[in-house]
Amino acid sequence: MTAGRRPSAAGGVRPASGRAAGTSSPGRSGRSEGTGPKGQVTRAPPAKAGSLERAIEEYLEHLKVERRLRPNSLLAYAGDLEVFVAHATAAGVVALAAVTPALLLRFVVSLAQAGLSPRSQARRLTAVRGLFRFLREEGQLDVDPAQALRLPKLPKRLPELLSRGEVEALLVAPGQDGPLALRDTALLELLYATGCRISEALDLTLDRLYLDQAIVRLTGKGDKQRLVPLGGPAIAALQGWLTSGRPALVRGSVRWVFVNHRGGRLSRQGFFLKLREYALAIGVTRPISPHKLRHSFATHLLEGGADLRAVQALLGHADIGTTEIYTHVTREHLRERHKRHHPRA
């Protein structure tokens, strides 16, 4: 990695913060990348073997190829590890073998002194711990210098939900007038019917949608696939979109289920803006995101008596501990209902 333009684990390049892409800038070790004779791009040499930077490059490649992290997650890991490299370099540590528990402890202190929230501190320390665990498992280190690192305690934050009434109003907010309205209705119905992530919905291709069987095949984190059933309203909305809306926008062969007004793949940003518009139209002024439909899906299932293991499978959670947070939400819901309606609450 260089401090000018750093190859990302997603295979592209990312400018360091505060610099425009393509400008010449010195790296942390004095290397630079800029424009050479006749406009040729000069690139910094690869990091030396045994260096901390080289180790991070290998770790990011592992996350990309072996663990199949998404580009946004890879960039987040790369950014957090770059902060650690800057700290180590400022302390005169460049070689991997020179990293000590004392250096890591000073890094922890620096994060707190920088005023980062406990959640942001935990994210950066998680990246660092993952790096050294990987290097130890690969035999590049005899001892993991980060094994004693402890993450800061985080306050339990319950997911924010939409009420059932708000969900019902949101699902009909786009209406049925025109291809884009049909698309947005179908996408909202899919999100709430399956509890899928917005990335899973936008990655959905026609060959993984089985409306005749009332099932959709979703691809989650780590390319893990799961089959999720569809209800009647979602099937009807998807059929309306595929037969009456999508053909008016698509030109040629496009495999994505959801497309934009030009017939290309629909972006997250494009739908976020539409979702906010629909939320305001029904009187929801607090922050909203597609993930709140996922939270609402899980909570409403548990409130209706669904088994926790079934909800885990539907959400695609690898660890049931991740799903258990929704049991806290339902308990809060019941407590509030009891307080509101019981005469001696």
Image (tube, rainbow, N blue to C red):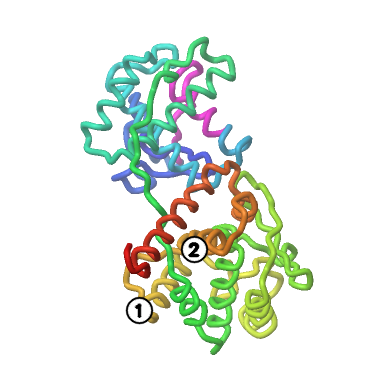
Q: Of marks 1 and 2, which one's residue comes earlier in the chain?
A: 1
* Horizontal and vertical percent position of residue 302: 55, 59
Query: Looking at the figure, which quarter contains the C terminus?
Result: bottom left
* Residue farthest along the front direction in this orientation: 344
**Looking at the picture, does residue 268 appear above or below residue 111?**
below
Residue 22 in view: yes
Q: Which amino acid does label 1 sit on?
A: Gly
Q: Which residue is drawn at 68% across and 64% down?
A: 205
Q: What element carries label 2?
A: helix
* Residue farthest along the top direction in this orientation: 142
**Looking at the picture, does residue 206 appear above or below residue 151?**
below
What range of the chain is rendered magenta?
41-61
Q: Is mark 1 on a helix, strand or loop?
A: loop
Q: How far apart are marks 1 and 2 (CA)?
A: 18 Å
Q: Mark 1 points at which residue?
A: 283
Of the residues tagged 1 and 2, which is closer to the observer?
2
The quarter of the picture where residue 179 lies is bottom right
Left or right: 194 as drawn, with respect to 38: right
**Looking at the picture, does residue 127 appear above or below residue 186?**
above
Q: Are marks 1 and 2 in contact (CB under 8 Å)?
A: no
Left or right: 55 as drawn, with respect to 332: right
Q: Residue at x 61, y 60 (%)?
A: 203
Q: What residue type is labelled 2?
A: Ser
Q: Which residue is drawn at 78% across and 69% down?
A: 213
Q: What numbered label is drawn on residue 296? A: 2
